Amino acid sequence: MKTLEIAVIPGDGIGKEVVPEALRVLDAIADIHEGLKFNYTHYPWSSEYYVEHGTMMPENGLELIKGSNAIFLGAVGDPNLVPDHVSLGGLLLRIRREFEQVINVRPAKQLRGMVSPLSNPKNFDILIVRENSEGEYSSSGGRVHNGIDEIVVQNAVFTKRGVSRVMEYGFEIAGKRNGHLTSATKSNGIAHSMPFWDEVFNELSAGYPDIKTRSEHIDALSAFFITRPETLDVVVASNLFGDILSDLGAAIMGSIGIAPAANVNLNGKYPSMFEPVHGSAPDIYGKGIANPIGQIWTAKMMLDHLGEPEMGAIVLEAIERTLEANIKTGDIGGSSTTSEVTDAIIAAMKEQIR
């Protein structure tokens, strides 16, 4: 029996609704795969926790979840209770940084049964591999002086180690998919970091002769996501560029509510963390209308990471069958409740193994 220890953090808002739905799907997978078992440990860390305790997680919080096989996160943030920079910095970003989750992976795929805003999406299937620890989101910089003389400096920090490892991950993933890796750059406008990014990409490309490569400036690449997404396979990008492209990818899928993400630790010292792209949406919390697909697709990515890709494939196929049957929440044109969508996905999973 393979037992996986999962640290579950529902977080805020609809995270508290969609995480239990995704756990129902994982339990159904365990029933299907008789040699697999999930042990869940739930942690109530959230904005409400902050209001009560003055911190987003206890002092030993990281130690509590360090030994898990994976972290399953819902959504973080409720600006009515806690400023976003406090909630994100005290929970999500703290886990990412201290657990060395240096890569963020987000798929953008034309799902059967979803209506893309693109007039002709051509069955696109893109995987965005984003550097997750440095780049434009580095905390280096500061402010000096006041008034009209105030100066603000924000430094983008790129290291050879950080750039190399995200690109190597991109090359490896591309080799398992369609063998095509696109690098997002802006070396015609950003004078130092992006030429360095290009140099590392060209240097590493020599070690992967079977992978087709191309570099595209971020402005043109953003346009290609709209005009010819079917030409893209794996896209590797810096922290800022990957953040923007992954939201664009969710948009062309038809809803950010269905988009998943993985924060990947490469060295094995700490668990990776899996979370949907959508926010906590406190305005619809408790109404039973939150879309569970982003969280359930996130569970699929966690299954892949934990060595169960066949089970992950069953989950994604079930999601698409459910969408094709027009069993959808209102945000994507349906009238089903959160739990009704999950029920349909579980039923579709069981149909696949009859």
Image (cartoon, rainbow, N blue to C red):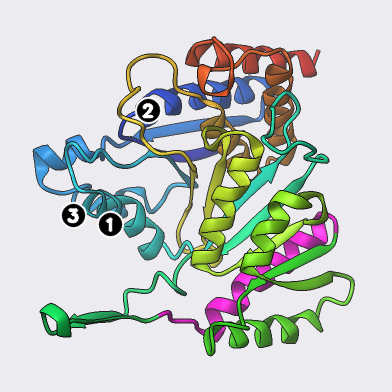
User: Which label sits on residue 59?
Assistant: 3
Q: Is residue 273 magenta?
A: no
Q: Which is nearer the eye, 352 or 79?
A: 79
Q: Where is mark 1, residue-wise?
A: 89
**Which amino acid, by three-letter code, is at mark 3?**
Glu
The secondary element bearing badge 3 is classed as loop
Which of the 4 quarters of the picture holds residue 104? Answer: bottom right
For the residues labelled 3 and 1, say whether their Cβ atoms are less than 8 Å apart: no
Quadrant of the rendering where the C terminus is positioned: top right
Q: CA distance from mark 3 to mark 2?
A: 26 Å
Q: Where is mark 2, residue-wise?
A: 14
The reply to whether residue 305 is in sight is no
The residue carrying pointer 1 sits among few (fewer than 14), some (14 to 19) or many (20 or more) residues within 10 Å by Cα, namely: some
Which one is earlier in the sequence, the residue at label 3 or at label 2? 2
Quadrant of the rendering where the N terminus is positioned: top right
Q: Which is nearer the eye, 326 or 164?
A: 326
